[in-house]
Amino acid sequence: MPQIFHPSSNYLFKIVIVGTVLAVSALGYVLFQLGADSSYATRQGVAREQPVPFSHTHHVGSMGIDCRYCHSTVETAAYAQVPPTKTCMNCHSEIWVTSPTLEPVRASYRTDESIKWTKVHDLPDFVYFNHSIHVKKGVGCETCHGRVDTMPLMYQQNSLEMRWCLDCHRNPEKYVRPRQFITTMGYRPSEPQEVIGARLVKEYQIQKLESCYTCHR
Amino acid sequence: MRIKSIWKVAGVLGALALLGACRQDMHDQPKYKPLRPSDFFADGRQMRPLVANTIARGELRDDEAFYTGKNGKDEIDYFPLTVDKALIERGQDRFNIYCTPCHGRIGNGLGMIVRRGFKQPPSYHIDRLRQIPVGHFYDVITNGYGAMLNYSQQIQPRDRWAIAAYIRALQYSQNANINDLSPEQRANIPVSTKKEPGSETPHVPELPNFPEKPTLIPGVPGATPAGVKPGAKPVGPPAKPAAPKTGAAQ
């Protein structure tokens, strides 16, 4: 009986084996990217549907309302606060009172039932985060949340991954701004950022907090 | 055979990778956090309201003047805390956040929301509001007034007084009189040295011709803003709007 495989087939098999290993690792890499590290997983840049299509473009960009008008606890508490329905009604008791889009807001005000907003910036529960200290140390809203004034529906500008947090925790001077510009959208430093950043780090006594328990406590 | 087992291993690894990405137990723990929904409480909220008839520590509001802006039924006409530059600047900051959407940056009642159809509030620079006791502003922020809903949740008591102080400063700024400055301060006002065309002497603003009493609307003699003692010397800008009365501070 003659041999089925010619000796040269050895090469073929070797190529197939190496190729398979490569293909599997490539597939693994793609799966990892898709599963853990992609904007699909972090939901970066994905506008979320909300019970009322609230537009930051309109309220911040066109109306010029300060962030803190609605997110009024951002300077004093860990949570910046999704405003209660009452805050909407401060204006919408008089404006757009017949708009069907705003019916859920009026219904919530009538019945005292919360509007179930979809949380867009949702950190894992094993992360401690406090807005007030970041605001106090000169981290602008825009630095993490992006140009909110250009977002018709809210989405997450940044990945909110740990390495993203660490980037600033390691080099705060690259990102901090004077406190009076905290809520400014489209802020441009009046001097080069290296100069102003280094000065603010000193002035606001900003520490480079990199230990695990800064956030995982 | 060998290739098949490699595929099996690859398949298991792939499935594990997928499973790993799906585990969210520690991301979404069943603990209570602010603003989260709850299945347990009837109102569906994890945040709990204060139990009725209880007062949180440090929240006893027994200083009537400070926490209501009133003395009995009357609005108080003094500040129940020390008014200094820091407080007025804090007031400016808070005013620009919470009040400008309707009242406008200078308090003329022409804010952006008004231009979009909200009922126009009166300007702060009318006689009635210039003379009204400061407690009125505190009370309006606390309880609302007319179309304006209350801001008691958004603005804390001390900040309400800061805003009231800043409103007085705004009123003063729109109604300032050169005669209120001391001669030294007047001498320090920069004078334009630009020569008027066809004139040899530098242009000097007509300083001495200001009316004795401030007027805002022509023909209507404005009165001294309430709370400002007649003859009280304002220090340069930002003007101190009212003679601070150091009553019960904070």
Image (cartoon, coloured by chain):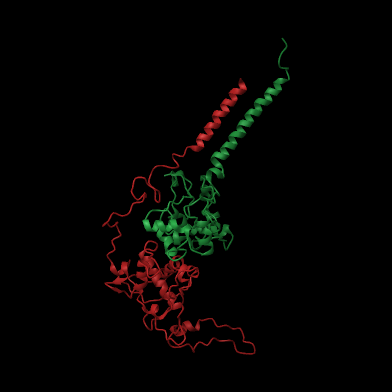
Is residue B77 left or right of A31 when viewed as pictured?
left
Picture coordinates of residue A142 (x, y %)?
53, 56
Q: Quadrant of residue B28 in the image? A: top left
Considering only vertical position in the picture, is A191 above or below A126? below
Q: Quadrant of the N terminus of chain B?
A: top right
In the foreground, B136 or B180: B136
Considering only vertical position in the picture, is B216 above or below B83? below
Considering only vertical position in the picture, is A22 above or below B104? above
Is residue A150 left or right of A135 when viewed as pictured?
right
Q: Residue at x 57, y 36 (%)?
A: A31
Q: Residue at x 50, y 70 (%)?
A: B115
Q: Is residue B94 visible?
A: yes
Picture coordinates of residue B226 (x, y %)?
37, 79
What letter labels the chain drawn in green? A
In the foreground, A135 or A154: A154
Q: Residue at x 42, y 86 (%)?
A: B221
Picture coordinates of residue A66 (x, y %)?
48, 63
What letter labels the chain drawn in red? B
